[in-house]
Image (tube, rainbow, N blue to C red):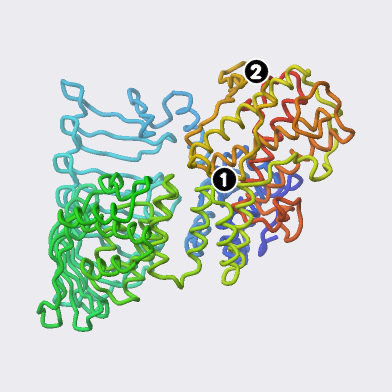
Amino acid sequence: MAGAPVELTPDNYEEITQRGGVCVVDFWAPWCAPCRAFAPIFEAAASRFPDITFAKLDTEAHESLSEPLDIESIPTLIAFKDGVEVHRVSGALPAAALDALLGKLEAVDVEVLKRRAANRKRTEAGTLPAGVPKGATWDAGEAEWSFGPTDPKGRQHGTWKFWRADGTLCNECIMKHGTPQGVFKRFHESGEVSQEGTFDKGQLHGPRTWFASEHFTTERMHENGVSEKVKKTVMLYDQGEVRQVMHFDSTGQRVVPTTGEPYPTRPAHLPEGAELREDLDQWALVSLNADGERHGLVRFWDRHGLLLWEAEYENGYRQGFYHSRAADTYADFRVHFEEGQAQTDFAVGEWSLLDAQRQVVLTRDLGLAPDEKTLERSEVFSNLARSAEGWREFARKARAEKRYREALLATARACATSMDVQPLVEGLEQLTLPRTKPSAHALAVSVVEEAGQLWAPMADCLMRGGEASTLLRAYAVLLDQTARPRAALDFLHAAMLLTPERKPYLFTRGLILLNLGLADQVRQDAEHLATVEPDTARFLGTYARALFPKFDFWPAQEAPRCTYDGLPDAPQQPLESVQQVVRKYATRLQAMRAELLQRFKPGAPVSWLPPDLSALLGAGPVKLEQFEMEFGDDTVEIDETLDLSQGLADLTLVIRGDWSALTWLLWACGEKTLRMPTRLAPPADFGQGAGQASQRLWQSRDRRIRGGDGSKPGEGFQFEGVPLGDLHPNLVTIAERQYAETQAMFYWLNDSDHVSPWQSNLRGS
């Protein structure tokens, strides 16, 4: 079997993993992208290690085998030797790291591992493992045993030692009245030193050195892309602040950490502390505080030693002077450098663009930079309507106070309201740094990707010349996500006025319009979008139908079908309970209908709301309850209440689920219209209806999680006119939610022990 991985099943699992020799098992799942990426690496290693048995286990198909092993993430690789688990690691390993791991397996002493396992069981039982001295105490937070002398006040004082749960020594440190002081050492499980360094009054000071081991160890070394060729790492500290990091191979030669190749020669004119940033291919001189944050002057050079930028930092934020090369960045070709001041990472005050001789080409005042919370609360992001003149007045006041970011954003809203973009164009020209179009676009895209959920960084990007259209669209998305769709629409319209050629912005507008309940306008945008992005247009159209469906008697749309066996024949709840639940669905739907009507101007046509259900309520709304009850050995929560503060789209999805459950409940009683049932006369295909809800819920979940049977194009049940296999993954959750509510209703209906469809235990599977 060497040379190709074996597929494990319940029939061969014990025989393969418990035989003599080494066996490595890849625990994976078909839906796991990292698993699929790791598979060819694992298979290739099998051919290089013919003496090792390689095996794979599908955790979804064989949950009974994987669950007892407490696998928390996949892929997970577990190594067995002579039937004993000797190592496990989670995550997709690079080929080099996998080879290094496999190369160590033959040297594993199974008897030693058995002793350590026995010690761990003693620790779990609260007893001392072998090798740990009497009097040692267990620290659950640190997961270590500790022992050593104390001073008269009970503080650690003198040499203290620490052991792992398996009884192996992991740390030895000199303490002085409760504070580390002097030399410390950490150890691999093998007893080799894994770290050593010195504390000075509780702060690391001087070299802190890591040593690799050829044996298996839980001590950290080769993480975050560090090559297995690195055998020693030295980090130089100055009273808790990291000054330099160096990596060395087995010969003692300094190497690049990610490749293990020889470290390049530093340009002679650079400071001695400058280190190569391999990911950037740049030299960097970075000082850090005790928390590992940039603090002080930071400088970066290219590979040849040409200064790229420098900035002053304070506890992780740019604070003070900033200077950078800027050739081919700004609209004026003469500009080669930019410099100015920063405050908590944001550009403030006077900034200058300089030519190659450091002469000023342009100076611009970038004003004051509000912090994140202040800007988020600004009126410029208010969801309340305001006239164009009102926004212009806001902009004038903000500009007078040097709040230029808010001034530009208010001007954008004024332009969207008046549909006149010229004042915004002029404001951008007067207040922001004038970048080239490619530079402006690239800067805006990068900031949106990194900080598109934050308010202040995007406003700062606007002042630094980032493309306004991209940033305003990002603000529209953020406002829509934070339940401010009217404000979102203003910002998006401003973006569209700046770049009318960008048809994909119609998609963003469609999503915002959906949150405003403007379904007809969404359909129009979908039609226009179809000429350039037909798939996106189809998604938008289907999403609109999902949020604003036709609220008729849904069971009449199709005959129920189900392939399950053992289906129920008739409801088990009494008529009185059914009538009361009908009233509760009607009460919920009426409450949501009234709430949504309040969000529109009186008399505004809202054609997509569900019909008035007051005829089902007779004496009026009934009480919606929230309580707990004992159900078997478990405590079950019942919550029939509503959160009416949700956004429009979220409320419409609740309506959709309730409407489906209500109409199918009436159908189950023999009704064909929206009327209160007076008797229980289930249709002949009652069981098919109950089974269909469960089967479609399972199919929806399978489609979402794994792309299962219903994911094949053109196949699966129809959802708003689209086969499940063609449904966009983001829309599958809507179908899943609908059928979860319908299934919960049927679960309640078919078991007289249940008291409400809103029981927590009816929404599991």
Residue 429 location, quadrant: bottom left
Residue positioned 80% across, 41% down in the render: 556
| Disc 1 to disc 2, C-alpha distance | 28 Å
Locate the N terminus by quadrant: bottom right
The mark lying in front, picked from 1 and 2, is: 1
Instruction: Measuring from the top left, give residue 535's x and y in whole percent.
Output: 61, 65
In the displayed structure, does residue 494 sit left or right of residue 621? left
- Tell me if I can see residue 272 in this picture: no
- Tell me if I can see residue 499 in this picture: yes
Residue positioned 44% across, 52% down in the render: 215
Q: Which residue is label 2 attached to?
A: 619
Instruction: Measuring from the top left, give residue 244's x and y in whole percent.
Output: 21, 60
**Secondary element at image label 2:** loop
**Secondary element at image label 1:** loop
Instruction: Measuring from the top left, give residue 301's x and y in whole percent.
Output: 22, 73
Q: From this view, report whether residue 324 is shown above or below residue 60.
A: below
Residue positioned 38% across, 56% down in the render: 475
In the displayed structure, does residue 695 sit left or right of residue 477? right
CB within 8 Å, label 1 to label 2: no
Q: What amino acid is labelled 2 in the image?
A: Ala
* Other residues around mark 1 within 10 Å, as few (<14) / some (14–19) / many (≥20): few
Q: Which residue is label 1 attached to?
A: 605
Mark with earlier residue (1, 2): 1
